[in-house]
Amino acid sequence: MRPQFTKLELRILILLASVEFTHIVEYMILMPLGPQLMQNLHINPNEFALLVSSYDFCAGISGLIGMYFLDRFDRKQSLIYCFLGFGLGTFACALADSFSSLLLARILSGGFGGILGAQAFAIAGDAVAIERRGASTGILMVGLALAMILGIPFSLYLAEVGSWRLPFFSLGYFTLFLNLLLFTILPRQVTHLREKTTSPLILLRIISKQSQTRLALFLQFWMVLGQFTVIPFLASYLVMNVGIPQKQLPFIYLLGGIVSLIAAPLFGNYIDRRGSKKVLMWTVGFSIIPLLGATHLPALSFPVCLSLSVLFFASMTGRLVLMNTVASHAVSSEYRGAFMSLVTSIQQFSGAFSVWVSGHIIGFGKSGSLENFQYVGYLASFASLVVLGLGVLIHKDQSKNQTALTKLE
């Protein structure tokens, strides 16, 4: 039976999905712009990795800071203030005129943008009943799909007809518009304030005592490592090694976004019916195939490459839905904002570490192509195997202790 959301729940989820759409596009657009930035700004793989990882690293720090205030204030106000700072960082990216100034702008946008995901999932966790939590996560993940269907292809089009600055200007203005909608439409989010106020130290004490919660955090780190070692350099690899023209990249992200748009709600509903642990085992296990395939592609025709991208984006979407669903189940409402902030920090630190490692593995060949990308695929596959092991541990611990992740509330 399909979950039935109330009108208020749908309104909140649509607004939050729009926030997810905006900050995901702003974060991800730098990756397909890699070939242009490397050429125009004379950036090597290590410097490009620094541009990407600086966002993740600062987002991780802001997530840790967010643990100290997300559960102490109206989450609507916190979301609006952080989204405003994120918009300023996006405009700074558009105005950057050098590698160093672009790096500083990415640090600013990452510092505010990294905490937006935690706020969105915390608000959704409070606003939607737990039996619809997987489905609500799937709706929020639609923001990712729409970012790939609309945001990234349109941003690449703007970069193609104008310059790489235009996507950031467009996102900056859209952020201001969306912030106005949040201010006027989103209800106050103070349900968590009715619970007993606790400090982050109490949350850390809870995590130290509950093995299920610790395993959920370890799963976040390895799940991100198992895909963000590959994703940031995938567009550059397709252009420089596989031979896909730069102007055809938007179609790959368009198809990937359509696949993600369909897959995200399906995965969310399936998790609600079957349980996250069972779905995790076969989803992550299958994802190793496209991870290895994407990093070992020979010169291919565009239709073949487009077809292979379906498997890759579908499997990555399933991993993301699983990752966020498991995290949102791990603690009760009064700790959820702080815990999701901690989860976001771990995800961002893992993303920064993943890109940093990839940047040191990958290099330029004499012909200008990327070298050693296949080793990145091996690393991502190993991390996925670790996730499978964590899934087994979670399942065993759940069978011994009735305080399972989905019943902590």
Image (cartoon, rainbow, N blue to C red):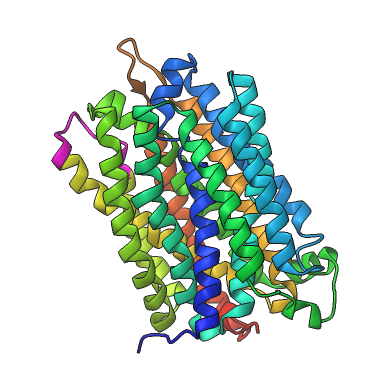
> Residue 376's x, y, as percent?
41, 35
103 or 230, which is in the foreground? 103
Quarter in which the C terminus is drawn: bottom right
Apparent side of residue 102 relative to residue 280 in the rendered image (left or right): right
Screen quadrant of the N terminus = bottom left
Query: Residue 300 lies in magenta, yes or no?
Result: yes
- Residue 335 in the figure: left or right of residue 38: right
Residue found at x 77% / y 60%:
67
Q: Quadrant of residue 53?
A: top right
Q: Position of 405 compared to 363: left or right?
A: right
Up-down relation of residue 5 to residue 202 (above or below): below
Of 77 and 386, the residue lying toward us = 77
- The range drawn in magenta is 292-303
Residue 407 placement (x, y as % from top left): 60, 84
- Residue 287 visible in the displayed image: yes
Please give the name of the residue rendered at 82% of the width and 60% of the height, measured from the top-left corner: 68
Q: Residue at x 46, y 48 (%)?
A: 226
Residue 210 painted magenta: no
Residue lying at the far top in this picture: please name it: 366
Observer able to see residue 293:
no
Front one among 367 and 225: 367
Among all residues in the image, which is located at the extreme bottom? 1
- Closer to the camera in the image, 90 or 351: 90
Q: How many marks?
A: 0
Q: With respect to residue 252, does 77 lie above or below?
A: below
Rendering quarter of residue 343 = bottom right
Residue ID at (52%, 57%) = 20
Q: Vertical placement of 164 versus 222: above or below?
A: above
Q: Is residue 90 left or right of residue 247?
A: right
State the image coordinates of residue 134 (x, y, percent, origin top left): 47, 75
